[in-house]
Image (tube, grey):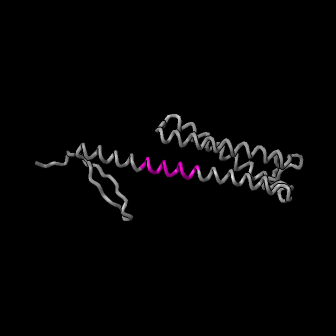
């Protein structure tokens, strides 16, 4: 529990908070691994659930982090090693999330290219470029023929 100020209650031990945060970070690492597997396997139905779980867990991690940051014992030397370990786990989560983000960007690019290919096959595509050199597809209907 926390005070209205966001500070941890004195009876809430830092040890308990650190242990809980450790479990949550390890759960996030596992969830990110599952997300990567689903992305690679293009399992979009299950991916929606994992995305929701990831968002919920991220909020929980942030809340626990705030409680740890506000704990009166946080700056004592005996907690530096466990806090460093948690930061290492958080870095693993961040790195895994970045990898998943790159996979998502790659999948989006492939999807755009496949859509363009299908539109070209239908004869309905004009490829244009924006001011940054990024391609965009613009479809046209063949109903504008005047002859």
Residue at 83% in and 56% down: 74
Outermost residue, right direction? 11
Where is residue 100 drawn, in percent x and y? 53, 48
**Foreground residue among 14 and 64:** 14
**Is 98 displayed left or right of 82 in the figure?**
left
Outermost residue, left direction? 147
Outermost residue, top direction? 45
Q: Main secondary structure of the magenta part?
A: helix
Where is residue 16 drawn, in percent x and y? 82, 44
Indicate yes or no whether the magenta region holds residue 106.
Answer: yes
**Foreground residue among 135 and 104:** 104
Q: How many marks?
A: 0
Q: Which residues are magenta?
A: 96-108
Where is residue 92 drawn, in percent x and y? 64, 51
Indicate yes or no whether the magenta region holds residue 146.
Answer: no
129 shown above or below 103:
below
Residue at 50% in and 52% down: 102
Residue at 37% in and 48% down: 112
**Is 64 displayed left or right of 119 in the figure?**
right
Residue at 67% in and 41% down: 27
Place residue 78 in its image quadrant.
bottom right
Place residue 36 in its image quadrant.
top right
Where is residue 75 drawn, in percent x and y? 83, 59
76 shown above or below 106:
below
């Amino acid at each position: 529990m926390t005070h209205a100020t966001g500070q941890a209650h004195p009876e809430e031990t830092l040890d308990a908070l650190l242990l809980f945060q450790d479990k949550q970070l390890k759960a996030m690492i596992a969830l990110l691994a599952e997300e990567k597997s689903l992305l690679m396997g293009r399992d979009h139905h299950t991916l929606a659930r994992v995305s929701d779980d990831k968002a919920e867990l991220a909020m929980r991690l942030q809340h626990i982090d705030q409680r740890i940051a506000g704990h009166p014992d946080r700056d004592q030397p005996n907690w530096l090693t466990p806090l460093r370990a948690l930061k290492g786990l958080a870095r693993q989560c961040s790195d895994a999330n970045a990898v998943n983000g790159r996979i998502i960007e790659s999948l989006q690019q492939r999807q755009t290219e496949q859509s363009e290919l299908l539109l070209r096959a239908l004869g309905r595509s004009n490829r244009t470029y924006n001011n940054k050199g990024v391609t965009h597809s613009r479809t046209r209907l063949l109903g504008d023929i005047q002859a």
